[in-house]
Image (cartoon, rainbow, N blue to C red):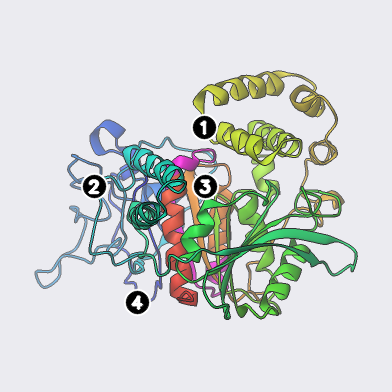
């Protein structure tokens, strides 16, 4: 089940010099002896030492007698006191074993971090929270509320209140502030070219309309259906808007990944800030491509946002698509291309079914999809990958594969979503959420380093997830997003 966030990292000031390194590190131990250092550490440089300097706290495992967190024979003891613990103040989650990876190189210095306050201050707890049985309970209760609404409105209303309260306990987020029925609108937004209109679904909390902070999600996967996540924010006083990106579903223009996301995201944020139902504060988040559009929307300091939470996403795409010189992330590109093409052909209900297949929620469909992707990835030449997957050419996939070097002109406007360095001028809070087995992680760690050096308020959470393990990280991401929005925008309740 989803667990609490690994590391919610804060200010590194006041760190004493690290003690001498022990002759035995956590990475040099066998997993059977010391478990895995599945935690996130903040560092200057790349991520190799995240593993080497971590201390395991695996379930049922004793801590190492040597390492950074325990004194070794080489540590000096002055005035009868032990040297300070280098990793004091960092929280850990026990996790699965993690093999060494060649993508992590370098030897950065690790800083002590002050953990942020917990996402919520619930007094109550629920024994089914974060479990599959809790998911089943909430789904059955939702079906019961829907059925009873035709026969007994009062009983259905009482059960609806129970459903919302249990949902808050399940995700460990603050209690519901309002049970009023929200208002949903389909709204067009004109981009800076004066011709292209992007459509989205705007949800406003029930009751009297007044200025409130707004949560924005920009997606290529469809925004016409009711987003169940929207309810979590509406009940806590936020407006919620989910928008189709350029060339997808109802939105005008032509879809080409990354190319127009910065301008379109900035125009959307500027439009939201000017509306009477908005108090000018905007937060953006998203998973995978939606996380990249979130960074793009926050990239212009002239149109600032309060908080960005990119989940399994990074500010650049080239290193993800081409993780090494001459190598291609074929499975990721194949799965995502199939998803984009198939969603564009389906209704909202069929689109939900496809999303569940990709995220392994419906395993019997996921197995068929994996076989299809496996056959397509094994076919040569690689430029015909789109034909094997969807039966027709996909221009952006072919163009990307034909430009395998970052210095080629093709990537000039199709690589970077946001400049996180001091030159970019961004002023928002950022909380990255990543997975040890996710292809976005190396670039995401680099984004964290750059943003930290630029002086941004940035946090990083990494868990034992792969890119498609949405069920695994969904609960953690929701708690982090809610906490960051309440911390920076305060809600509108």
Q: Earlier in the sequence, mark 2 or mark 1?
A: 2
| Closer to viewer: mark 3 or mark 1 | 1
Q: How many marks?
A: 4
| Closer to viewer: mark 2 or mark 4 | 2
Q: Is residue 118 left or right of residue 218?
A: left
Q: Which residue is mark 4?
A: 14
Marks 4 & 3, CB-CB < 8 Å contact: no
Q: Which residue is mark 1?
A: 360
Label placed on residue 105: 3
Spatial CA distance of label 4 from label 3 is 27 Å
Indicate the quadrant containing the C terminus: top left, top right, bottom left or bottom right. Answer: bottom left
Residue 51: where, in percent of width, then height?
A: 39, 47
Marks 3 & 1, CB-CB < 8 Å contact: no
* Residue 30 seen in render: no
Q: Which residue is mark 2?
A: 127
Could you say which is closer to the camera, residue 335 or residue 206? 206
Spatial CA distance of label 3 from label 1 is 32 Å
| Closer to viewer: mark 4 or mark 3 | 4
Marks 2 & 4, CB-CB < 8 Å contact: no
In the image, farthest residue toward the front:
151
| Closer to viewer: mark 2 or mark 3 | 2
């Amino acid at each position: 089940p989803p667990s609490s966030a690994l590391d919610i990292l804060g200010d590194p000031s006041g760190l004493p010099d690290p003690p001498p390194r022990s002759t035995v590190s956590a990475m040099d131990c066998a997993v059977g002896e010391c478990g895995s250092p599945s935690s996130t550490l903040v560092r200057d440089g790349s991520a190799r030492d995240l593993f080497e300097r971590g201390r395991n706290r695996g379930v049922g495992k004793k801590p190492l007698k040597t390492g950074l967190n325990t004194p070794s024979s080489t540590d000096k003891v002055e005035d009868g006191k032990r040297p300070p613990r280098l990793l004091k103040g960092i929280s850990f989650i026990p996790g699965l074993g993690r093999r060494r990876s060649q993508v992590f190189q370098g030897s950065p210095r690790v800083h002590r971090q002050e953990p942020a306050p917990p996402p919520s201050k619930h007094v109550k707890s629920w024994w089914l929270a974060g479990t599959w049985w809790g998911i089943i309970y909430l789904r059955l209760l939702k079906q019961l509320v829907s059925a009873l609404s035709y026969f007994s409105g009062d009983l259905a209303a009482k059960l609806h209140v129970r459903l919302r309260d249990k949902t808050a306990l399940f995700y460990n987020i603050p209690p519901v502030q309002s049970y009023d029925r929200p208002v949903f609108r389909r709204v067009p937004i004109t981009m800076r070219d004066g011709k292209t209109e992007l459509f989205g679904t705007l949800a406003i909390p029930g009751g009297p309309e007044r200025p409130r902070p707004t949560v924005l999600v920009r997606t290529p996967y469809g925004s016409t259906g009711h987003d169940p996540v929207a309810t979590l924010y509406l009940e806590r006083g936020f407006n919620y808007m989910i928008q189709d990106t350029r060339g997808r579903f109802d939105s005008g223009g032509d879809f080409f990944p990354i190319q127009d996301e910065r301008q379109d995201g900035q125009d959307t944020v500027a439009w939201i800030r000017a509306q009477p139902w908005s108090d000018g504060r905007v937060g953006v988040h998203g998973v995978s491509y939606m996380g990249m559009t979130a960074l793009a929307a926050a990239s212009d300091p002239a149109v600032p946002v309060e908080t960005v939470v990119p989940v399994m996403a990074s500010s650049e795409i080239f290193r993800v698509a081409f993780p090494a010189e001459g190598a291609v992330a074929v499975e990721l590109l194949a799965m995502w291309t199939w998803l984009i093409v198939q969603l564009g052909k389906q209704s909202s209900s069929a689109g939900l079914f496809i999303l569940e297949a990709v995220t392994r929620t419906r395993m019997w469909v996921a197995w068929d999809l994996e076989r299809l992707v496996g056959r397509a990835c094994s076919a040569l030449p690689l430029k015909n990958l789109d034909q094997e997957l969807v039966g027709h050419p996909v221009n952006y996939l072919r163009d990307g594969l034909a430009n395998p070097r970052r210095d080629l002109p093709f990537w000039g406007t199709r690589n970077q979503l946001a400049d996180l360095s001091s030159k970019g001028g961004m002023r928002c809070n950022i909380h990255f959420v990543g997975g040890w087995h996710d292809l976005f992680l190396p670039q995401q760690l680099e984004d964290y380093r750059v943003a930290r050096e630029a002086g941004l308020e940035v946090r990083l959470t990494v868990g034992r997830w792969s890119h498609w393990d949405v069920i695994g990280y969904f609960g953690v991401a929701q708690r982090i997003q809610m906490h960051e929005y309440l911390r920076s925008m305060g809600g509108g309740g």
